[in-house]
Amino acid sequence: MRVFLCEKPSQGKDIARVLGAGQRRNGCYSGAGIVVTWCIGHLVEAVPPEGYDERDKRWVIEQLPIIPERWRVEPKAATAAQFKIVKQLVGQATELVIATDADREGEMIAREIIELCGYRGAIQRLWLSALNDASIRKALGALKSSAETLPLYYSALARSRADWLIGMNLSRLFTLLGRQAGYTGVLSVGRVQTPTLKLVVDRDREIARFVSAPFWAVEVALSHAGQPFTASWTPPEGCTDEAGRCLQQPVAQQAAERMRATGSAQVASVETERVREGPPLPFDLGTLQELCSQQLGLDVQETLDIAQALYETHKATTYPRSDSGYLPESMLAEVPTVLDSLVKTDPSLRPLIDRLDRNQRSRAWSDAKVTAHHGIIPTLEPANLSAMNDKELAVYKLIRAHYLAQFLPHHEFDRTVAELACGGQSLLAVGKQIAVAGWRQVLASSEEGGADSDDAQRSQVLPALRAGLSCQVGHVDLKALKTLPPKPYTQGELVKAMKGVARLVTDPRLKQKLKDTTGIGTEATRANIISGLLGRGYLLTKGRAVRASDAAFTLIDTVPAAIADPGTTAVWEQALDMIEAGQMTLDAFIAKQSAWVTQLVQQYRGTTLAIKLPPSPSPSCPQCGAPMRQRTGKSGAFWSCSRYPDCKGTLPVDTSTGKRSASRKQRASPKAS
């Protein structure tokens, strides 16, 4: 019997349909000699410390570090019934096809189950980039060998076990040290979450330290041959900051008075250059999350959920968790099919698609730059737009527009810079005239359209100017301004910062590694990292802004600098890539991680932490670290996790004070990312 092991029920249904396995059974589909079954995400999970030793239920500093001699996983209680079905089917299989998501995590989801079930038969790998029928058939005709993707599993295991070692040991260590200093919350430490949290803490501190400085600017309304335009005063050297802003009010005031008195300005020089802009790449997930946050006000998890629905439910777009916006050159042959399907999906596109150059090859087509996944684009088959909700439709249109942009001409405009003299002062006027709309016409109703609208308000078309011409001075506006602090992160900007964290690293090798791996976290995990920090109460949302809580400042000030340093993550990612390439073994990597964690525990075990105690009496959840809320049950008042029912952590209440009972002992370990 040939068993296909998928990641989700919807994925299993799509693959079963193409295979002709139409008989629905409990937890699977079956056909002639074929069974398609599925996980529900991870069916198994790493055994917690107390699973190795009952004594580790209690958090005791003397028992650290906790390092398993033989790593184990166990079925998750919530999905135990489906695991039982999968185990039975895998036990009957003569051949197994891994059909989970085509990435490191998908490989781990399947392989952990295969290992736990003791399967030793033939294995092949189905590598899917889309769930429409044509893509599934194409992938079924090009199955990969088990050996080809096995290193992905070892790399994922290395990541998972390193996260366990750091999260379980260092979270316990610093939580216990925090208690000695009077801090009652859980200090949850993670390989990616802690550097991410530091980004927000550093930004918030930068905002808090910021001291606004006054500066002055002068704008001059000019005209020539009846056509008005605006020029900006260029302050002389010696009165400006590094950004060229005038810091001396008398200088700006005197300049404005002289220009008002003069009444005319002479053109000193004019330079015009033709600027050509190629289309933006198709989306990777991070870029999609950034723009959806900026343009649609979606948080990063919501964008991921929508992109997943467009992929799984609507079959309208390709695999969403991609870290590359490039497309393989082989997909050029599919361009006519994709474009024809888009017209069938939305007939209103016909006039636009008839103008496309189907043979045009943009920079997006590059085998050398495609990673395990290509950019997110429309699929080969028509989609049903009426089945999408408003947000899904908006995200779909963004993805579609970036694909169509590849077949339109470059956007071209003339940029003109004119220097003028007025009353002994220098002025600068900048103009922009669009020559070829090109690909921007297809983005006019999407995110680039919004950018164009803003640009149109700032830009101007200059009259025909040449050196020596005289322009009439109209209004001279002296503006008293103030420098502004950095803006707080939004979720989309935080994802962008995680991707671009290389700019914060000084070591050139680590900087390059972070660039090569697109920063900290992955396209598949960044939304979960941010959601986890919000759930634990380390991050707070204020409107669209993301701010650090008091607990976040406490944590970042407490943990070793190396834990919060993105350069450390770069070293780990380099090692994970080496495992994937067969240049390092899983055991060697875990041995190094174990030694490092042991060293940190020994180094900090006797440390006395200087912790700023939070003013709020609300404790943190012992299971996930989120803030707790006081509730009343049958036995009276108790603390309940604010993430209930997703997390069911509780603590008793000292009825004399209303605070957490001092006799409470920790029962669970926080999850770490």
Image (cartoon, rainbow, N blue to C red):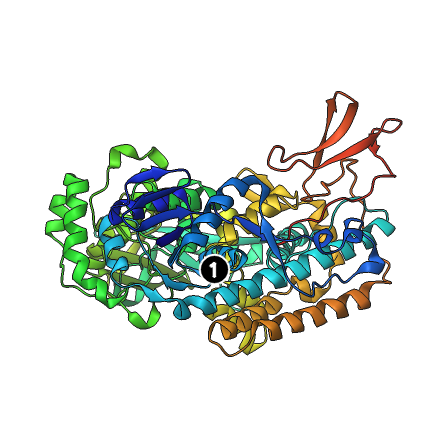
Question: Residue 329 at what x, y percent from top left?
Answer: 24, 67
What residue appears at the point 49 percent right and 60 percent down from the top-left corner?
Answer: 499
Left or right of residue 285, residue 488 in this image: right
Q: Is residue 603 visible?
A: yes
Percent x, y for residue 634? Answer: 75, 20
The residue under label 1 is 119
Q: Residue at x 74, y 47 (%)?
A: 186
Seen in the image, is 387 located left or right of residue 510? left
Question: Mark 1 is on which residue type?
Answer: Tyr
Q: Nearer the viewer, residue 611 or 430?
A: 611
Residue 618 in the image, given as x and y percentages of width and height? 76, 35
Q: Nearer the viewer, residue 197 or 622?
A: 622
Count of marks, rendered view = 1
Instruction: Answer with left or right where residue 495 lies relative to residue 436.
Output: right
Quarter containing the N terminus: bottom left
Asked where in the image residue 23 lies, by quadrant, the reply is: top left
Q: Quadrant of the C terminus?
A: bottom right
Q: Quadrant of residue 436?
A: bottom left
Q: Nearer the viewer, residue 663 or 469?
A: 663
Q: In the current view of this chain or complex, which residue is farthest to the right?
A: 656
